[in-house]
Amino acid sequence: MKFHKIIRISVLGILPLLMLGFNSNKKDIYKKDWIDFNKNDVKDVFEDPTALLEDRVKNLVSLMNVNEKTCQLTTLYGYSRVLADELPTKAWKDKVWKDGIANIDEHLNTIWNQEKTHTKYAYPYSTHAETINIVQKWFVEETRLGIPVDFTNEGVHGLCHEKATPLPAPIGIGSTWNKDLVRKAGEIVGREAKALGYTNVYAPILDVARDQRWGRVLECYGEEPFHIAEMGKQMTLGIQSQGVASTLKHFAVYSIPKGARDGDARTDSHVAPREMFQLHLYPFKRVIQEAAPMGIMSSYNDYDGVPITASRYFLTDLLREKFGFNGYVVSDSEAVEYVSEKHHVAKDYKEAVRQVIEAGLNVRTTFRTPESFIEPLRELIRDGEISMKTIDSRVADVLRVKFRLGLFDNPYVEHPEEADKLVHTPEDEAFSKQINRESLVLLKNENNLLPLDLKDLDNILVTGPLANEVSFTYSRYGPAFNPSVSVFEGVKKYAGNNANVSFVKGCDIVDPDWPGSEIIPTDLSAKEQADIDAAVEKAKQSDIIIAVVGEDEKRVGETKSRTSLGLPGRQFQLVQALYKTGKPVVLVLINGQPLTINWENKFLPAILEAWFPSTAAGEVIAETLFGDYNPGGKLSVTFPKTVGQIPLNFPFKPGSQAGQPGAGPNGYGNTRVLGPLYPFGYGLSYTTFEYSDLVVTPKSLKPQADIHVSFKIKNTGKRAGDEVVQMYLKDMVSSVTTYESVLRGFERVHLKPNETKTVNFTLHPDDLAILDKNMNWTVEPGDFKVLVGSSSVDIKLSDQFKIENVYN
């Protein structure tokens, strides 16, 4: 093996070994085909690469003392969060992690808006790989058993590392409806993690975003569980194909706190048991069983009065015994602490530690010292309040993942210098732009205003508080410091010398009284009026107005739930004033959740939803507005007309989103607005499509047979474009009330003008199953309708089949 030579050269290039806390008199533990982790000159079973996995795990657990076991049950948060050092020091010999540690999270990654995390060891990429090797070397060589560390990092917007490949926000990724693209995104995240020294990526997020007010809609793929499962499965497979772990989050029922209140709330999800299984647990079950992720992050909310992280039912009975998960579970930040401090189901923190370990938690992860968890855990063991059998089981889960990752066979980045060639390549940058393009959703295009033609335009105004802003292209959970292009810059560059492109901001993102001004309106200040007037004056001199409005990273995201979904601040007044000029207005939305843009939808001729794109934002939006790219994304969340309609989602139960009676003995009338502004699955194109020739076979079958569905899709327009074809299933009669219809297939299909393709789907028995009266998954006999279309409401084709009684 080459480990010793590689690591020694890297260390000497940075600091002498002794300064890094290494004992220079240690013997060489790196043998020809194994590593002597416990430094006893004997190839123990756990050190033998040819031994069976479970034998290696069992052997290592048997060699560990209590201190070493408890250290494998907590996280050491990386540099500047908890760990004060970038590199090992002599003082580490006196720290609790002298006996090892389960994982080190976000070490030396650099977060764009947290200056304390910025470090010279993040970039160049090879420097980070070398530095991670040094830290790993310390744990391998300077602890008694030499158990390697699992280096974890975030990865939902692309790998959370300086200048890694950026991805759009997950809500944008979800809007691509492109499974192949998501698989490739996962492969890039996994490859970059591996090259940089990370071994575990906290992605994807499988939360089902059912309340549009919730701030983390931004970080979800959407509201529909089948769609989320399909996208999450591909991301997981992609990440783990590169030899690193994927950790799913947040398990479970996390995304629906009471009233969508986040921040200091984050509790009390109001979800019935059947809904919990059919909606919120469905993506986790599917991805666990079909992609075998090695990690799960447990959430900090409760369900029906029991904190998830302290629930044996969720962490053991469901997760492991029913779903078959065999990795290790980390807690979300403060999930353990909340058991006593927020949920008050434990008298003190020590009791909270006991409850979570008994429930099935493996690793406590939060922005606190490892000692804060390890010390009470050791007291519980010493006092006989937790059995060693339980501890051994929790430790074994962690070690099993480390063995599966190959950390006991090759604990280091073998060729750190190659990271410079493997991270954010030119091909990755091209991919980043493409996934941004495919995330765009065309919401309105009256009289085919889009795409714009430069030959018809002399003066273009790009206005709005987000028009020349790029902060939304970065994320606390994504790469830092990639160069970014604003929409104004993108349009200006695209137009070149062919048109005069001007920028006037028009207003700030919010006014000084926001969000209070949403319920108690205030008059515009003199400056606010002057800013809007300046934009209007420039608009009058322009041929087209591109208004870039919405939210930034300070208005949406974790802890940032909203009570209104209109354009924040004075943006609505700006848009209205621009409209009154009589010049055509193209609205570009930058936002992390659906917005109630009813007036805008009624009066403005064109609206493009961009979500939170990554750093190529300006370039890809300009290409789309001017027709170099034909948008084909579809909404993965319902846009309500008002927050008063919430919850308003797909799928939904019969009658749950219906109208009001026009007559009747028990009350009737017209007192509320009905229906969504834009339904689930909706999105327009610059071309048109025609569906035909639906074939469903067989028409009658037993419950465990497959159903084959095929149909044709044709591009009937003059431009090449993508259509996301969607297949829904309706159970006509069931023993319990089920959903009006459910999504059971989708494909993004690229078609040239006049081109026709045949699309094939297969319905498996699980796709037909419902939870019956006894809460058992069952395929019931009866009639089913197959619905094929371009959205959940725009159904083009339909047919039926019948499930026969198995005893007939």
Image (cartoon, grey):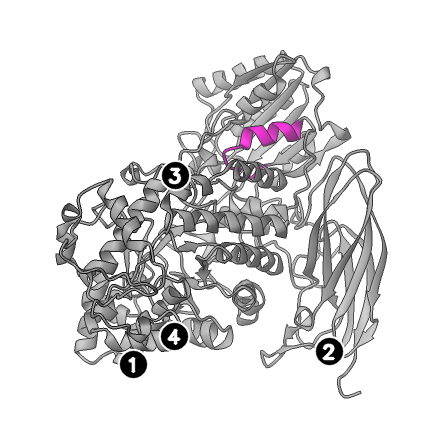
- The amino acid marked with disc number 2 is Pro
How far across and down, in percent of the image, does residue 733 sit? 74, 73
Nearer the observer, disc 4 or disc 1? 4
The residue identified by callout 3 is: 162
Q: Going from the N terminus, do you reach mark 4 or mark 2 first? A: 4
User: Measuring 63% from the left and 41% from the top, which residue is drawn there?
Assistant: 438
Q: Residues within 10 Å of mark 1 (few under 14, many from 20)?
A: few
The residue identified by callout 1 is: 389
Part of the protein shown in magenta: 610-625
Q: Going from the N terminus, do you reach mark 3 or mark 1 first? A: 3
CB contact under 8 Å: marks 4 and 1: no
Q: Is residue 361 visible?
A: no
- The amino acid marked with disc number 3 is Glu
Q: Residue furthest right?
A: 693
Q: Going from the N terminus, do you reach mark 4 or mark 1 first? A: 4
Q: Say what secondary structure mark 2 lies in.
A: loop
Q: Quadrant of residue 356?
A: bottom left
Would you say residue 446 sits in the magenta stretch? no
The residue identified by callout 4 is: 51
Q: Residues within 10 Å of mark 2 (few under 14, many from 20)?
A: many
CB contact under 8 Å: marks 1 and 2: no
The residue identified by callout 2 is: 703
